[in-house]
Amino acid sequence: MSILKEDIQAITALKEAAGSPWGAINPESAARMRAQNKFKTGLDIAKYTAKIMREDMAAYDADPAQYTQSLGCWHGFVGQQKLISIKKHFGTTKRKYLYLSGWMVAALRSDFGPLPDQSMHEKTAVSSLIEELYTFLRQADARELGMLFREQDAAREAGDSAKEKEIQDKIDNHETHVVPIIADIDAGFGNEEATYLMAKQMIEAGACCLQIENQVADEKQCGHQDGKVTVPHADFHAKLRALRYAFLELGVDDGVIVARTDSLGAGLTKQIAVVNEEGDSGDIYNSFLDCDEISVDDMKQGDVVIKRGDNILRPKRLPSGLFQFRKGTGEDRCVFDCIEALKAGADLLWIETEKPHVGQIGGMVNRIREVIPNAKLVYNNSPSFNWTLSFRQQVFDAWSESGKDVSAYDRANLMSADYDNSELATEADQRIQNFQADGARDAGIFHHLITLPTYHTAALSTDNLAKEYFGEAGMLGYVAGVQRKEIRQGIACVKHQNMAGSDMGDDHKEYFSGENALKAAGKDNTMNQFS
């Protein structure tokens, strides 16, 4: 028996027990409303989606072709439309997630207005966006089921039992739009207690996966900008444990933690790590510091020194009080960070790189896997990379190394449209197209995401519309550029009243008021033009 039929029976029993006061209650209508609200709380969502992520991680371990993907979203409607589109084009939401970018929260969701990615926005803005995203995804479920219920009623009225059964099967096997969200908690917005409190809010809103970075919270920078400052492992691991405790306290035992290292591009640290014994994590962290070997006589007032063996070392300290690492140690520090984070309880890794290069990423992952064989990454397919130029240069360099003639190309100017139809550009585009599959197979990338895609698509589509509508095209700029394409591509929100819940509201009015219901979907509703 389907869950819907079980609910109809259960509510029928309740109605009979309640007697005449419940006489106007229709058990099937109530059961339908219950089906349209599968997830009652954010914790229900977090537990459900955490299980999905764990199953997907196991599937990837068995077959790297089973990698997962997501796009960053800054509004609930954007996330909803992404999932509706995925179901329309691919028939399933399997292995498709949402990413919540701290960058986009800072730039688009703060009461202060647009901010850089430096953790200056309100802490609660992140959990509020998680809740908003899931509100819109749950509404997408309710809308889709509501349309199926209407089709079922029409089949009943027509006496078409075969059609009614077909629709019932779709209802019973309905796949939810609710998918995992990988949520960016930046560097924790403070100390480990602040990290724990914020994590609880995010989990209660529905997040099953939290991504945290090893930068200093009050010095945090975007991963693709300069001036990044990392913290010793002991500090970072305390925050990893804070996230795990938050998951466990709230009963999300499968919660997923992504440990991000910015060490590849971070040449500074705010602290010299505490060393308890030679060769421990703190000692290795300090071994990457840029130091001068000195004698006791060379020491000056205010110097900070460390002892290594019989040597006294003075770390190079900047006027800001920060200490710098030796140049060229970034990859070694990334590998060390990742191994230590996995040992401390992280589930997935994130290595922020300066370019999308499978060989570079895979080289680090292979070193990590020598210690922890099932290590795997979440990777930022970042809009901060110039993908066209980077991959054309990668092809140029590969051809040069193999002895192929590249004299027809100017490496510094490969972004030029003059090369768009060239053999080099064709191979570069092929590599871009295959980047995610190649990265999953050769570089341990379990999850590919684009942090800011909808930020850029909103700007691009608005620019195109403004150019046409306010120019010579006038209203045709909207009709030809937007509405005609919506209709022909079957974009659900061309019926924007339906998308906003008008039809669901009509259904509820009929449940509540019966024949007295004043409904919006009559013959004069202009949305009928899109039927």
Image (spheres, rainbow, N blue to C red):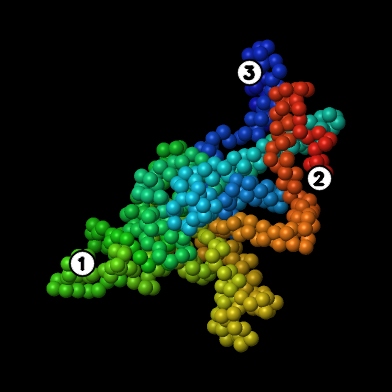
Identity of the amino acid at label 3?
Leu
Residue 168 is left or right of residue 44, and the answer is right
Q: Are marks 3 and 2 in contact (CB under 8 Å)?
A: no
The kind of secondary structure element at disc 1 is loop
Q: Position of residue 421 (x, y in %)?
A: 70, 77
User: Residues under labels 3 and 1: Cα distance?
Assistant: 77 Å
Please name the residue shown 71% across and 62% down the image.
Answer: 467
Q: Tell me the residue that label 1 is attached to.
A: 303
Q: Is residue 304 visible?
A: yes
Identity of the amino acid at label 1?
Asp
Q: Position of residue 94 (x, y in %)?
A: 62, 49
Disc 3 residue crowd, few under 14, some 14–19, many 20+, Cα 10 Å: few
Image quadrant containing the N terminus:
top right
Q: How many numbered discs, if any?
A: 3
Residue 96 is left or right of residue 359, and the answer is right
The kind of secondary structure element at disc 2 is helix
Q: Tell me the residue that label 2 is attached to.
A: 530
First in sequence: mark 3 or mark 2?
3
Q: Tell me the residue that label 3 is attached to.
A: 14
In the depicted structure, whether residue 291 falls above or below residue 454: below
Identity of the amino acid at label 2?
Phe
Please name the residue shown 84% across and 29% down the image.
Answer: 157
In the depicted structure, whether residue 349 falls above or below residue 159: below
User: Residues under labels 3 and 2: Cα distance?
Assistant: 41 Å
In the depicted structure, whether residue 12 falls above or below residue 304: above
Image quadrant containing the C terminus:
top right
First in sequence: mark 2 or mark 1?
1
